[in-house]
Amino acid sequence: MPPLQHMKTSIEHLPGRKQRELARIQEILFEEFDLARGQNSQKEYDKKGRILKIVLFGSYARGDWVDEAGKTAKCYQSDFDLLVVVNYKQLTDMATYWYKAEDRIIRDKTIKTPVGLIVHSLSEVNDKLAQGQYFFVDIVRDGIALYELEGHRFVDPKPLSAKEAYEMAREYFDEFYGAGEYQLTRLFITALEDNRFKEAAFLLHQAVERLYSCYLLTATFYSPSTHNLKKLRSLVEEKDERFREIWPDEDRFQRRSFER
């Protein structure tokens, strides 16, 4: 694998309204990150915390996004996939530093495109690049840096041999598929047959979470640490559009069913 060159920085291939949405999203991320760190915090990572990079990846970076909102019955709409890179691992805690930003983005009426946000420290991303994890190699190769603080570069990735990649993927698949299948075909079905619907819904959520993680880990060697099915679903459907057919969302009832 050749050394990585500087990341792309231009989003001129996107329509003007998409560019404006991304600009607004960046404003919210910086504002809420500053508020979350707190002016009076004595913690070093709060006082010295910085956003080092904001990277657009996925279909909007590649140029093959889909936006059928209001145009077709299916209404499929690609997410803005964003990687935020910070300088301390503690600052990646979504519940402490990023949930208000995510909520503001959802409620902002000028932002029409769904947003999938993942946050990692620079050392985490560089460790994953050094391990040859496809997910991050693809981001750095194909992504677009919307914001970069000078002097904080990504390392060049280590190439995996075909044997190493296969063995790693096999381990992930064996662990996560078996667990997901058991939860789906045994625990969920049993709870459903016993009319224990709350437990069944919880077990179905866990099964789907495991199976989405199984695909991501097997195909890319990365799955975010989250129970948010919408975020996992977005990453999976971004990688393989066949997954879009799993959850019907042609009308409000079907979309609401998934949200519940």
Image (spheres, helix red, strand yellow):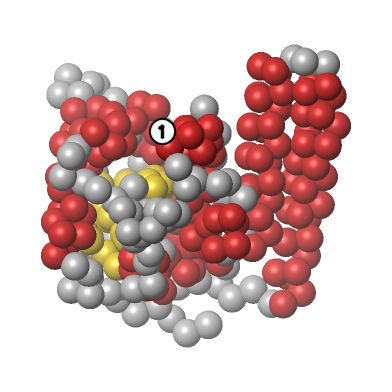
Pick the front one: 87 or 14: 14
- Relative image position of residue 219 (x, y in whole percent): 64, 63
User: Based on the displayed image, in which of its 4 quarters is residue 72 positioned?
Assistant: bottom left
- Relative image position of residue 103 (x, y in whole percent): 29, 31
Q: Which residue is mark 1?
A: 93
- Relative image position of residue 201 (x, y in whole percent): 66, 25
**Could you tell me the amino acid type at mark 1?**
Asp
198 lies above or below 17: above
- Relative image position of residue 164 (x, y in whole percent): 73, 70
Judged left or right of residue 245, residue 154 is left
Q: Is residue 153 something that shows in the picture?
A: no
Q: Residue at x 29, y 67 (%)?
A: 144
Q: Secondary structure at mark 1?
A: loop
Q: Residue at x 85, y 32 (%)?
A: 186
Q: Is residue 104 something that shows in the picture?
A: yes
Judged left or right of residue 199, residue 243 is left
Judged left or right of residue 89, residue 28 is left
Pick the front one: 115 or 223: 115
Q: How many marks?
A: 1
Q: Residue at x 27, y 64 (%)?
A: 145
Q: Residue at x 18, y 53 (%)?
A: 21
Pick the front one: 139 or 230: 230
Pick the front one: 38 or 138: 138
Residue at the extreme bottom of the image, as rendered: 2
Classed neighbour count for the residue bearing mark 1: other residues with Cα under 10 Å, few (<14), some (14–19), many (≥20): few
40 lies above or below 121: above
